[in-house]
Image (tube, rainbow, N blue to C red):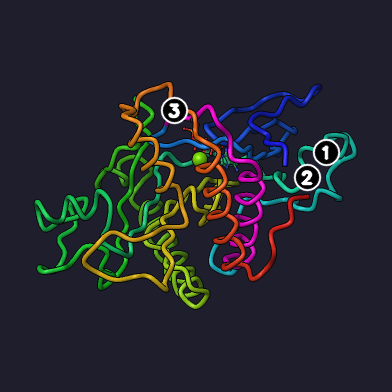
Amino acid sequence: MKPVPQTNLGGLALFKRGKVRDVYGLGDSLLFVATDRISVYDVVLPTPIPGKGAILNQLSNFWFGKTGNIVANHVLESDFGKFPEKLRGFPELQGRSVIVRKAEMLPVECVVRGYLTGSGWGDYKRTGEVCGIRLPAGLQESQKLPEPIFTPATKAETGHDENISFARSAEMVGEETASKLRGLSISIYKFAEGYAREKGIIIADTKFEFGLLDGKIVLADEVLTPDSSRFWPASSYAVGRGQDSFDKQFVRDYAVSTGWDKTPPGPELPPYVVEQTRQKYEEAFEKLTGRRMEFK
Ligand SMILES: Nc1ncnc2c1ncn2[C@@H]1O[C@H](COP(=O)(O)OP(=O)(O)OP(=O)(O)O)[C@@H](O)[C@H]1O
Ligand SMILES: [Mg+2]
């Protein structure tokens, strides 16, 4: 499979090139293309993962469908066959793109944590709190929290997300909107965590992005993918230690093992890391959706 690290769609205006997505303007709507780029520690690596963009796109679409009864979302058209003719002239878009409504994105990254891991585990060991939220004493690494917690973040100048308090998020978007974001994020997470658990995957934590459309909150961006979440295989889960994962952890570990200092440029990935990462993403997709991943 040929990787798609970047798209160049002649005649279309690039609205934004993110770390992973190429977004094109279509008037009131956007063409949202997931490329095969991979970023770790907010640095895009020089080596793409072939097919990753298609997996992310189709997994997000799956979750948009499943969560539509909880919150409206930005998707207008996910069927490439129904795209406008001028877009169907770009076969590289097939499987990896959606047409979405252009939203006014809210500057709060809505992180939900259901298990104690990563930086949260580090915080908890030192302070008994995660992002300012006090937790019961005596929890172990990777343990499920009594209730999922909302720990918002914001995109800082450096490109790294910075944790903020709920009060700060309320200053940024207003008290009412911040409360709604928290409620929606926890509801979506709880639903998805329960769903995924039955399919053999633990969603340890995740990040949602919401936007405003005609003053109403909509779920946007990507949803519950291995890029935006920590996915653990339920079969090997045990508290008191770190977990295997279906997500970018494998790539992070490799990148750090090369002695890389987490500043650009990132290291090239060897073929075995590319292949295992693709397999992990594909396995997560297939377990969650119950479908074979089709790359067209
Ligand atoms: N419906 C939407 N309307 C407008 N912008 C959107 C919408 N959905 C997502 N976005 C934005 O599109 C971009 C998606 O690109 P990508 O995920 O590659 O970016 P990123 O690298 O995660 O973030 P950024 O480049 O903003 O730091 C993000 O900036 C996201 O906030
Ligand atoms: Mg993103």
Q: Position of residue 190 (x, y in %)?
A: 42, 70
The secondary element bearing badge 3 is classed as: loop
Crowding at dot 3, Cα within 10 Å, few <14 / some 14-19 / many 20+, comes out as many
Q: Quadrant of residue 156?
A: top left
**What is the three-letter code of the residue carrying label 2?**
Gln
Q: Which residue is mark 3?
A: 267
Relative side of 94 to 61, left or right: right
Task: Say which residue appears at 53% left-offset and 49% top-offset.
Answer: 276
**What is the three-letter code of the residue carrying label 1?**
Pro
Tag 2 and tag 3, C-beta contact below 8 Å: no
Q: Which residue is mark 1?
A: 91
Q: Is residue 49 magenta?
A: yes
Q: Position of residue 115 (x, y in %)?
A: 30, 64
Crowding at dot 1, Cα within 10 Å, few <14 / some 14-19 / many 20+, comes out as few
**What is the three-letter code of the residue carrying label 3?**
Pro
**Dot 3 or dot 1, earlier in sequence:** 1
**Mark identifier at residue 94:** 2
> In the picture shown, does residue 15 fall above or below 136?
above
Relative side of 222 to 132, left or right: right
Tag 2 and tag 1, C-beta contact below 8 Å: yes
Crowding at dot 2, Cα within 10 Å, few <14 / some 14-19 / many 20+, comes out as some
Q: Quadrant of residue 102?
A: top right
The secondary element bearing badge 2 is classed as: loop
